[in-house]
Every structure is written in structure tokens, then in C-alpha cells.
Amino acid sequence: MKKIYKGNVVFTKNIGELTSFENGYLVVENGKINSVYKILPKEYEEYEIIDFKDKLLVPGFVDIHLHAPQINNLGLGADLELLNWLEKYTFPEEAKYKDLDYTEKSYKALVNKLWENGTTSSVIFGSIFKKSNILLSKMISQSGLKAYVGKVNMDRNSPDYYIEDTEQSLIDTEDFIGEVSKIKNIKPIITPRFVPSCSKELMYGLGELAEKYDLKIQSHLSENIDEVKWVRELHPDCKNYIDVYEKYNLLRKNKVVMAHCVWSNKEETKKIKDYNITVAHAPVSNGNLASGIAPIPSYRENKINVGLCSDLSGGHEIFLGKVIKEAETFGKLRRIEDNKKYNYMTTLDYFYMATKGSGKFFGNVGSFEKGYDADFLVIDDSNIQDVNERNLEERLKRFIYLGNSGNISERYINGEKIEKPF
Ligand code: GUN
Ligand code: FE
């Protein structure tokens, strides 16, 4: 089944390179992009054309790292750094998700917000509670959005009201994998919280589950200076933070996303590259929690894949347009810190990270190249136009700098319009 959508088509195939078609056509076949045209070939003339007129058509945003059970903490906790923030704000909030009524109420709001902000795909940390995570997975699936969902594991250095027994944590994770694998558009992902929260036995067991079910893995890496020091103390046999994940078989090549990597040194960066790990860059979170400025310009130079994320609720901003803007600012500051050793990075580089950079983790997501999932947003930027004629690149930049979720008039996933979920 073919469908044709007409509008101002804008996307990035390669980092920093914009492809645009003014009054172009997106031809979608069975939910995938078949082709994009400036002039529609004769063979398509008898198809119905859905005409978005002067609006922009851009790939849906892909948020590659966020914590679902932190949704009610948005805007709180920016007065502490990571380790104290976890103790004071985060663990007490996540512990509430043992209650399925609280889960349902809160996740209705979360899923609505993802929809509203044009986040068509996301990679999510849940809580430690199996049932709560299964409910989250079902709710996202019902909404039509796509996600990887992970049951968080933590069996050490955690408060007694929010900690698991090692064996039970692994049993619950295996049950979770079985249940979630049956849910449409949702994939389970192995989710050790971070090294300080996971015993050697737990990490090893999670590595085995990842192998057994051929699953991807997500965690945190070198986010905060005190965290990095603590990991050194906990694992004196490992030279760098990443070596702990490596030692316990948690670095599956091409299948890992690590959030932050703010303080990764040269050796750690080499391993990020060698294992083709995707770095989840969270500038808003890194600012709120005073974690530091990630060396994204150097990752780009090293051809490391970077995706953008909100890191809710370390970050409070769900709209990835704003995250793109913050990433750009952080990147410029980092480049100055690095004595301008690396190339200047622009809005288009970060737009790529919020679409195809993050989308690669899902496969063919985040672009309008042939065979990609037809996941797109319809952008009405009429309220942010000025008196000058603007080209599509300028209109995209203004949407990112001046726009918000109110400019997203429709969301499509696999060529189907997705309505407000709850
Ligand atoms: N490291 C371990 N847990 C977390 C979390 O919930 N948020 C952030 N930003 N970092 C973490
Ligand atoms: Fe995080």
C-alpha cells in the first residue's frame, strides 16, 4: 500500500548535511519510505496525495535515554550533584512505582508528553519493578509510539526501600524480557543502573541474559567526577570505568548505549569507539546536575555515534528541539575549552543526533532515506516566520531555536497518524 505526503521535506542523511525538498513528496509503502521527490513521477499521479501545504515534514525525534519513573520530578533537584541527587530526589520517587495506580497515572502523563513533543521513538529506563515496567511497555505500545524499555537492576549501594536481591533481580528481568518481547513496537533492553548499583554477580548475570536473548544494553558511564572516583574505589582491578562493564561482559559490540561519557579519558574513548557504543548526550541534564561539558566535538572527530537525549529528570526538557539548542551551546563551550582543536559544530550536526544519530539504535529510523520507517512530524512554523523569505534550512533552525511542541501539528509513525494517547 502506497501513500503520498506533500510538504517541505527536511532531513539529514549525514551529520551536518541537510537534504531538503521544497514542496516535495514523501512516498511511503507499507509504513516505510519508498522515495522522496521534488517532482512526482507520472506513475503516482492517480494516488491520493495528503497535502500539508507550506508546513515542514521532519523525521520524528528519537530520545535515546530517559528515565520514565522520574517524570514527576521534572524541574526539581537541580541543587545537587548526581550521587546526592539520586539519594535525595530520585530513589524515593522511583520507589513509588511499586504501586500500579501511581504508575498508570504517571505514565499516562509521560506518554502524552512524548507524543506532544514529537518524540516518536525512545530508549527508556524504567524502575526496578517488573509489573510497573510491563505496564509502561503496554501503554507505550497502545499509544503507537516506539521504544526500548529496560527494567532497572540494582542490588548494592542503594537504600533499603529501593534495592533488589541479586537472584530475584535476574529472575524478574528474564520474566520481563519474556513478557515485553510479545508487545508490539516495544523491545526489552538490559539495564544495569550504573556500576555502583550493581554487584559483580548481577552484572555477570545480566551479561548472560543479554547473550541468551540477543539483547541490547543501556547504562551510564563517566557522568560525574565523584561517581568516576567511586567506581575506581569499588573496582581497583579496573583501570577505567568502562573496563568494569567490559569485564562483566556488558559491552556487546554495536549493541550498547551509554549515557553521558562526560569524563571519559583517551583509553575509555578508544573502547567506546572499538565497541561502536552509542553515546547518549544529555546537555540539559549535564547542566542541571553540574556534571560537566561532554567532549562531543572530539567524539565527532573520532566518528563515534552520538544520539541526543532528555535524560529525564536529570534533564527537565522533553522537547528535543530545546535539547538540540543546548547541545549546540555546550559543544561551542567545549570547543573553546579544547583550544579550538576540533571543528565548529552547528545546529544541523545536533539535529542529526536527535534524529538519525539516535535512530540508528533502532535500525532504519530517523531519516527519509529509502527503507526507513516513515516516522515524521508535521511542523507549522507560521507563528515564528519573519518578514523575509526563508529557505528550509533557516526555517528548521528557527523551529529549533524559537519553536516548541505547539508547532508540531501532526505526528506519523510508519505512515500512520498517531492521535493523543490518553
Ligand atoms: N546514574 C545512575 N542513575 C542515574 C539517573 O537516574 N540519572 C542520571 N542522570 N544518572 C544516573
Ligand atoms: Fe540517565
Image: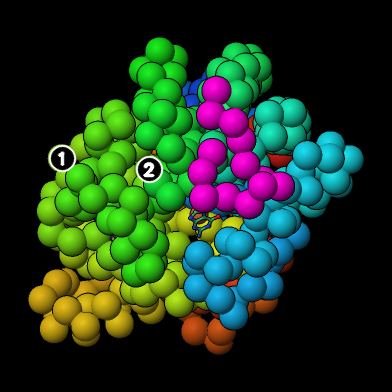
Q: Which residue is mark 1?
A: 274
Please name whichever residue, 292 or 247, is drawn nearer the observer in this view of the structure.
247
Q: Report, in whole angstroms, how far the alpha carbon at label 2 lies from the one at label 1.
A: 13 Å
The answer to whether one can see residue 186 in this image is: yes
Across and down, in percent, residue 113 comes to 72, 54
In the rendered structure, find residue 344 and report the number of the disc placed on it.
none
The front one of 164 and 322 is 164
Magenta residues span 155-167
Secondary structure category for the residue under label 2: strand
Q: Residue at x 20, y 45 (%)?
A: 237
**Secondary structure at numbered mark 1:** helix
Is residue 327 something one can see in this rendering?
Answer: no
Instruction: Sort mark 1 into few (<14), some (14-19) or many (20+) by Cα contacts within 10 Å.
Output: few
Q: Which residue is mark 2?
A: 257
Residue 13 relative to residue 123: left or right: left
Q: Amino acid at mark 2?
A: Val
